[in-house]
Image: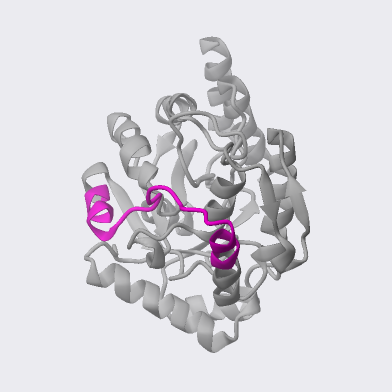
Amino acid sequence: MWLAHKLIQGVAQLTSHNKLPILIYHQVLEQPDPFRTCTPTVAEFRQQMEIVGRYFKPLSIEEALALLRKNKLPANSICVSFDDGYLNNLTLAAPILKELAIPATVYVSSAFTGGENMWNDKIIDFLFDQEVVQYDFSVIDAGIHTIISNKQRNQLTLTILEQLKYLPYKQRLEVVDNILECHHYKLGAAKMMNSQQLKKLKQYDITVAAHTHDHPIMAVLPIEEQQQQLITNIEHLKQWGVADEPLGFAYPNGKMNQDYSQQTVELVKKLDFSHAVTTHHGVCTPSSDFFQLPRIGGWEKRPVRFHLRLLLDMIRG
């Protein structure tokens, strides 16, 4: 195992100058989740970060991008990022990152710091509550379902999330709340960090960056609403004293044309963000658009395969 890692590291040393993989996570979980199968547990995240810390040169995104712009990024450089602002970024991921001296960036949607969970988490928790077996989605013309297995729950969850994802965010929230109210369903504890918890991230060398206020699909909003989403997000982060300068940005969902447009990109530039990251797969190079930077996600669970995949991505990049 050790020999395989050293071999991969050696090949990467020869091929990865001025190539920057930015890892993308959302959550780190205490236990495996039947729906969030790509989300690492604490044990899996530790294994991955041990590889990052031992065989790579972890940098903050701002430091790495500054070097990349000058064509001076060292071989085996790497960055770690999280989207949305989940509490487990602080409680579970941050201690591991600090122990291994790995900086990170969390892109935060500011509307959820008051205890409100994101719409998709509401649906997922609702559909994976084992005490609920009868679901009525007639309000969105998705029928009535009796669920008796996690496979059925998975299929229905994917269907409902896809049906709701591209609604204007206000309508989407109303529909989700209506569904839960009709089933008399009470949600669990808050999953997102509040403003005080966001402040604690600095103790772990974790930078807070922007991710819009309500996490809408920007491409379906008028440009005026897109601008308001960004400005409100910036204002909240600054008001709480957590907005690091320069301030970076992550596009919600993160696919060009599908989730954001060229208009959105121009707006991000106009508001003086230092960079913007997407969910397009790939590594960053000096020729990358620094306002549409790719990232790498969807992790291999086995350590050697995790390391090997990063090498292959850098070779392709």
Residue 65 lies, with reference to residue 50, above or below; the image says below
Q: Quadrant of residue 163?
A: bottom right
* Furthest residue in direction bottom, as rendered: 224
Judge from the rendering whether residue 37 lies leftward or rightward of residue 237; answer left or right: right
Nearer to me, 30 or 69: 30
Q: Could one spot residue 73 in this view of the protein?
A: no
Q: Residue at x 42, y 63 (%)?
A: 109
Question: Residue 191 magenta-drawn?
Answer: yes
Residue 116 lies, with reference to residue 235, above or below; the image says above
Residue 44 lies, with reference to residue 105, above or below; the image says above
The spot of residue 277 in percent (x, y) is 53, 60
Say how many tags the image has. 0
The spot of residue 241 in percent (x, y) is 21, 65
Nearer to me, 289 or 307: 307
The spot of residue 303 in percent (x, y) is 55, 22
Question: Residue 185 magenta-drawn?
Answer: yes
The spot of residue 222 in percent (x, y) is 60, 86
Nearer to me, 204 or 59: 204
Q: What's the image's color scheme?
A: one colour
Judge from the rendering whether residue 314 lies leftward or rightward of residue 40; answer left or right: right
Q: Could one spot residue 176 in this view of the protein?
A: yes
Q: Residue at x 45, y 83 (%)?
A: 228
Q: Residue at x 31, y 48 (%)?
A: 206
The quarter of the image holding the N terminus is: top right
Q: Which residues are magenta?
A: 177-201
Judge from the rendering whether residue 222 lies leftward or rightward of residue 152; answer left or right: left
